[in-house]
Amino acid sequence: MREAESKLRERFPEADYHRHNENRLYIRVPRERLTDACRFLHQERGMRLCICTGIDTREGFEVLYHFSDDDSGGLYTLKVVVPKDDPQVDSQAGWFPSTDWIEREMHELLGIDFPGHPDMQPLLTSDTDWNPDWKPLRRDYERRAEKHGR
Amino acid sequence: MAGRRIVPIGPYHPLQEEPEFFKLVVEGEKVVDIEIHIGYNHRGHEFISPELTYDQVPFLVERICGICSNSHPMAAVMAVEDICNLEIPERAKYLRTIVHELERIHSHLLWVGLAGHFIGYNTVWMWAWKYREHVLEVFEMLVGNRNHYAMNKPGGVRHDLRPEMVKPIRDAMDLVEKKVWMLTKAVLDDPVILSRLEGVGILTRAQALAYSTTGPTSRGSGVPWDVRRDEPHAAYGLVDWNVICFPEGDVLAKTKVRMLEMIESVKIIRQCLDRIPEGPIEARIEEVPPGEGCGRTEAPRGEVFHYMRSDGTNRPLRHKVRAPSYMNIASNKVACVGGTIADAALTLAAVDPCYCCTERMAAFEDGRLKYTWNELLKLSWQKTERVRARMGR
């Protein structure tokens, strides 16, 4: 795990590194370096994508890419923070099919745009009359009863 | 060449009795493309979880899936423990392992039965489910329930193992081991079953890596990854066992992985019963500091991943749940293509898909939400009261 971390630091010196414990490393990368970092972890280091998480915070929308290094047991989380008035993160789905569904889900539930995604349709609400403007995982999303007019 | 046609499977699966929709694009008998639609059972767990306290969250995530009802709470409490950097007591580690492996045996037996049902071999179905009953009886004795074990809590476990429970568990394991071997041999010796499984629905190693599949779906494609070994948690680093992996990538390889994993689970449970130390079963968590944590464990279908963000209050700020089927079902896009329609149903089932896991209830009527959360809760309480009254309690 330490060896991979030093390689990462060498390749991405501008990133912000936070080690939580022996098996957890959080790496905040600038938005424009995300694709390079994902490619580095998956293609060069052979890591598996666990999932992505989108979070609405005071600072902006955070998008986390959790990569698992199954040979050493470490978990590497790439973190990108985007402003709320410009919620865009480059899509990885074109080269990395694992991200296809989760980018659609984050777009649908949190309203983050992923330019370059080959098929940005709703994943979970496609067959319902769910209003695409309702983003339930946003902090300003009103409670259900008011939303549905009751 | 025959023209393209669409063969729909779903939105209510005729065999699996679960809501999902596969649109098979076929030319004659051959599947040339597939469209997968999910979302028919989206329940919004990630939305509900931040409204609950850390002690309540395991009960919520336990209900994501009735089959993996230990994996989700276990991963969720591990995420909380990861935020706190907390090591749980040794006895709790062994207890978590025992319940987790029992769950794997019952889940794999369930799949073997279903797979038999899918290929029209109903004897396998009935036999596998018959032997699964013994495992469910062990659960009932151990935690008081056949499913939904309520075993995990942040910092440890809720139920202790009493000395008089050891023998019945050992007896059940002896029986399960004998019967699993019998089933394995019966399945692998049967030329009809072999010809239905061998070379069908191949997922190559490269495809498994590109789709980040997990669990038996990966291990049947030559990817020898298992979170139990790679990131040892609970008592998995303290007992001897093997990761089962086959390189072929077809449905037969996945079947073999599941069959032999049950034998490994029996081995793990026996060692746990031998080595389990005396001591406390939980560590107290005074407060959860601000921070973030990930918990993951190897569910019967693959890695369950939970991420939690804490802001220092008694509720998570964000809770992300990823069930293994979320990654595994997506890989059907490549595994099904090139096969025949008859094989497609089996290939789609070979990842042991769990739709309720993937979509983590909302009832709609005339396009409007029928019940609110509190109304659903009330319905549930009313039913509990009715059952109590009927039972005279």
Image (cartoon, rainbow, N blue to C red):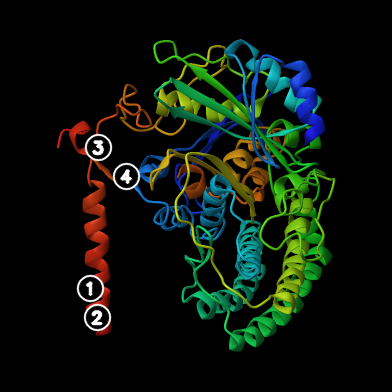
Q: Which mark is residue A144?
A: 3
Q: Position of residue B153 (x, y in %)?
A: 49, 61
Q: Are marks 1 and 4 on the same chain?
A: yes
| Measured Cα–Cα span from mark 2 to mark 4 | 28 Å
| Measured Cα–Cα span from mark 3 to mark 1 | 28 Å
- Number of callouts in the render? 4
Q: Position of residue B391 (x, y in %)?
A: 28, 83
Residue linked to disc 1: B386
Say what secondary structure mark 1 lies in: helix
Could you tell me if residue B13 is visible in this image? no
Residue linked to disc 4: B362
What amino acid does circle 3 point to?
Answer: Arg
What amino acid does circle 4 point to?
Answer: Ala
Mark 4 and 3 residues: CB-CB less than 8 Å, in contact?
Answer: no
B281 or A126, which lies in front? B281
Residue linked to disc 2: B390
* Horizontal side, residue B283 vs residue B180: left or right: left
Labels 1 and 4: the sequence-earlier one: 4
Q: Which mark is residue B137?
A: none
Give the chain of mark 3.
A
Relative height, residue B279 to residue A112 (above, below): below
Mark 1 and 4 residues: CB-CB less than 8 Å, in contact?
Answer: no
Q: Position of residue B382 (x, y in %)?
A: 21, 65
Q: Using the rendered view, name the quadrant where residue B194 is placed.
A: bottom right
Mark 1 and 2 residues: CB-CB less than 8 Å, in contact?
Answer: yes
| Measured Cα–Cα span from mark 2 to mark 3 | 34 Å
* Residue in the picture at 69% in, 49% down: B215
Labels 2 and 4: the sequence-earlier one: 4
Q: Quadrant of the C terminus of chain B?
A: bottom left
Give the chain of mark 4.
B
